[in-house]
Amino acid sequence: MMRILVSISVMLLCGAIRLAHALRLSVPLLYGMLTITVFRPWYVAHTALADGIFFVLLGLTALSWLYTLVRMVRGC
């Protein structure tokens, strides 16, 4: 039973990683995981800056989506 649960969990994690990669969210998610785990003392001391960087990364991702959408509409 435990083996089945672990297998399902790994498959769900792989699916989530593939979805994040397809949506170009790999860099913001990696940044978020690193700041919360590895750079925790820096994050606590500079919360506003860290959140600002995260939102800029999300904004750049949204801009890349818009750029792709415009290219698809124009047919280039």
Image (cartoon, helix red, strand yellow):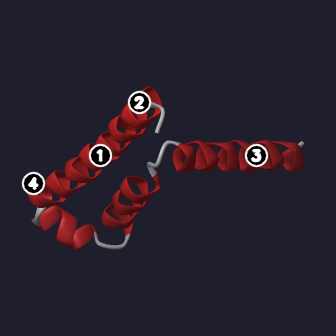
What crowding class fits label 4: few (fewer than 14 Cα within 10 Å), some (14-19), or many (20 or more)? few
Q: As shown in the figure, which amino acid type bears the numbered disc 2?
A: Arg
Kindly report which numbered mark, 4 or 1, lies closer to the viewer in this rendering.
1
Which residue sits furthest top?
73
- Residues at circles 3 and 1 in contact by the CB criterion of under 8 Å: no
Q: Which residue is mark 4?
A: 48
Mark 3 or 1 closer to N-term?
3
- Residues at circles 4 and 2 in contact by the CB criterion of under 8 Å: no
Q: Which mark is residue 44?
A: none
Q: Which residue is mark 3?
A: 11
User: Where is residue 76 drawn, in percent x and y?
Assistant: 46, 39
The residue lying at 35 percent from left, 45 percent from top is 64
Left or right: 22, with 70 as reference point: right
Q: As shown in the figure, which amino acid type bears the numbered disc 1?
A: Leu
Left or right: 40, with 25 as reference point: left
Kindly report which numbered mark, 2 or 3, lies closer to the viewer in this rendering.
2
Pick the front one: 62 or 7: 62
- Residues at circles 2 and 1 in contact by the CB criterion of under 8 Å: no
Q: Based on the displayed image, in which of its 4 quarters is residue 31 positioned? A: bottom left
Q: How many marks?
A: 4
Left or right: 59, with 13 as reference point: left
Q: Which residue is mark 1?
A: 58
Q: CA distance from mark 2 to mark 3?
A: 37 Å
Mark 4 or 3 closer to N-term?
3
Pick the front one: 17 or 73: 73
SS for dot 3: helix
Q: CA distance from mark 4 to mark 2?
A: 39 Å
Q: CA distance from mark 3 to mark 1?
A: 26 Å
Q: CA distance from mark 4 to mark 3?
A: 35 Å
Q: Which residue is mark 2?
A: 74
Mark 4 or 2 closer to N-term?
4
